[in-house]
Image: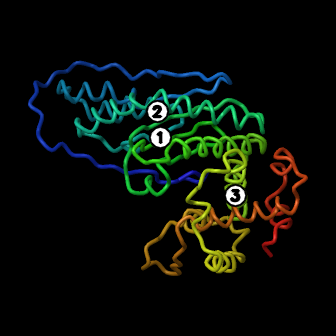
C-alpha cells in the first residue's frame, strides 16, 4: 500500500479477446517522453498514460517487436527513473488494446482534478513541514478490489528518491479526500527519510512508528478524512496483536512488515504460520503515535519527527 518496504501493488494479466488483423511492419516506434506538470513549489506530476501511447500504436500497427518495445523501451525508460510499478508490472506485457484505450482516455479525463488536489495537499502539508520537491507518478482509473477498500487511492512511495506512485480509481466515492490524505501522508514519509539522511527503517518498531507518524501527520491536516487502515482493528484485537508482536519489535526480519503491518497473509502451510489482521500494524502504529503525542501536546511536528521510535513508544501508553 503506502509504505517504504516493497509492496506488491498490482499484477494484471491481460489477453486480447480477439486477434487483431493487421499488417506486420518493422517501423521503429519512438520512446515515450515525459509530460511533466510543475506545481508552485517545484513538485513534478507525471501521468503514466503517456508511457503507453507508443506501445498502443505498436499494437495497432502490428510492429513485430512490440513485446520488445514494452520491455526494452517502456520498461527501460521507467527503470532509469528508479520507478518500476506501472500498470503492467515489472515485465508483464499488456496486450489488451481495449484496456489501454480506456486507460489512456480515462486518465486524461481526470488529470486536471488530480493535479489540483495534489497541489492543494502539498500546499497544506508544506505549511506544517518544509520539504524538498517530490515527483508524483499517477496511474488513473486502475480498478481492483483492494483499491476500493482503500478509498480509491493506492500508493507506493520510493521515499528517499522523493518519488511516489499513485493508483487512483475515480469511481470510488471518496477518492478526492483520500488522495489529499495520501499525498500528505507520503509527503511526511519523504520528509522523514530526507531528515534521516536517506536511512530507511530497519526493525519492526521503526516501521510501526514511521507509518503511524505519517498517518498522524495526514490526520493532523485532514482530520475529517476516515482512513480505513488506521481503523482496522477493534480494541480487543489490537491488544491481542500488541501482545503477540512485542517480543519482535527489534527484529529486522524482512517478512515482518508484510505480515504484521500490512496484514499480508503467507501460505498457511508454511512452518510457523501466524495469521495477522489486514492493516493491523497500521492501526497499531497510528495509535501508539497518537497516544504518545496526546501525552505530550507541547511537541511540534519538527520536534516529534526527530524523536527515535523507542522514545515515542516510551512516551505512549503502550507498555
Q: Which mark is residue 253?
A: none
Asked whether, in this view, residue 225 is left or right of residue 130, the answer is: left
Residue receiving disc 1 = 84
Of callouts 1 and 2, the N-terminal one = 2
Vertical order, 268 against 13 (above or below): below
Q: Nearer the viewer, residue 167 or 89?
A: 167
Q: Confirm or deny contact between disc 1 and disc 2 (CB under 8 A).
A: yes
Between marks 3 and 2, how big is the CA–CA gap?
30 Å
Quadrant of the image occupied by residue 232:
bottom right
Quadrant of the image occupied by residue 20:
top left
Rendered residue at 51%/34% (across/down): 137
Residue 183: x and y in percent read 61, 41
Asked whether, in this view, residue 57 is left or right of residue 121, the answer is: left
Between marks 1 and 2, how big is the CA–CA gap?
6 Å
Residue 3: x and y in percent read 60, 52
Quadrant of the image occupied by residue 92:
top left
Rendered residue at 40%/35% (across/down): 75
Rendered residue at 51%/76% (across/down): 275
Residue receiving disc 3 = 212
Residue receiving disc 2 = 78
Amino acid at each position: 500500500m503506502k509504505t517504504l518496504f516493497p509492496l506488491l501493488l498490482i499484477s494484471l494479466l491481460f489477453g486480447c479477446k480477439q486477434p487483431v488483423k493487421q499488417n506486420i511492419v518493422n517501423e521503429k516506434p519512438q520512446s515515450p517522453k515525459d509530460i511533466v506538470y510543475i506545481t508552485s513549489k517545484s513538485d513534478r506530476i507525471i501521468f503514466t498514460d503517456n508511457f503507453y501511447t507508443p506501445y498502443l500504436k505498436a499494437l495497432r500497427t502490428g510492429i513485430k517487436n512490440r513485446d520488445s518495445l514494452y520491455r526494452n523501451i517502456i520498461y527501460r525508460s521507467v527503470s532509469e527513473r528508479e520507478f518500476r510499478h506501472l500498470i503492467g508490472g515489472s515485465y508483464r506485457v499488456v496486450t489488451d488494446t481495449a484496456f489501454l484505450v480506456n486507460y489512456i482516455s480515462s486518465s486524461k479525463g481526470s488529470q486536471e482534478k488530480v493535479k489540483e488536489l495534489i497541489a492543494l495537499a502539498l500546499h497544506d502539508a508544506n505549511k506544517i513541514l518544509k520539504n524538498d520537491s517530490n515527483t508524483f507518478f499517477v496511474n488513473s482509473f486502475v480498478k481492483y478490489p483492494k483499491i476500493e477498500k482503500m478509498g480509491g487511492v493506492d500508493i507506493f512511495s520510493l521515499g528517499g528518491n522523493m518519488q511516489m506512485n499513485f493508483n487512483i480509481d475515480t469511481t470510488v466515492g471518496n477518492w478526492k479526500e483520500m488522495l489529499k490524505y495520501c499525498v500528505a501522508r507520503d509527503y511526511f514519509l519523504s520528509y522523514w527519510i530526507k531528515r534521516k539522511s536517506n536511512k530507511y527503517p530497519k526493525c519492526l518498531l521503526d516501521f510501526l512508528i514511521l507509518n503511524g507518524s505519517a498517518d498522524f501527520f495526514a490526520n493532523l491536516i485532514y482530520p475529517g478524512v476516515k482512513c480505513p487502515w488506521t481503523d482496522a482493528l477493534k480494541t480487543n484485537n489490537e491488544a491481542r496483536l500488541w501482545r503477540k508482536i512485542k517480543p519482535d519489535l527489534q527484529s529486522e526480519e524482512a517478512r515482518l512488515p508484510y505480515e504484521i503491518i500490512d496484514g499480508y497473509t503467507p501460505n498457511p502451510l508454511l512452518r510457523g504460520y501466524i495469521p495477522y489482521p489486514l492493516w493491523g500494524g497500521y492501526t497499531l502504529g497510528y495509535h501508539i503515535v497518537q497516544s504518545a503525542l496526546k501525552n505530550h501536546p507541547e511537541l511540534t511536528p519538527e520536534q516529534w519527527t526527530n524523536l527515535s521510535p523507542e522514545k515515542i513508544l516510551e512516551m505512549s501508553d503502550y507498555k
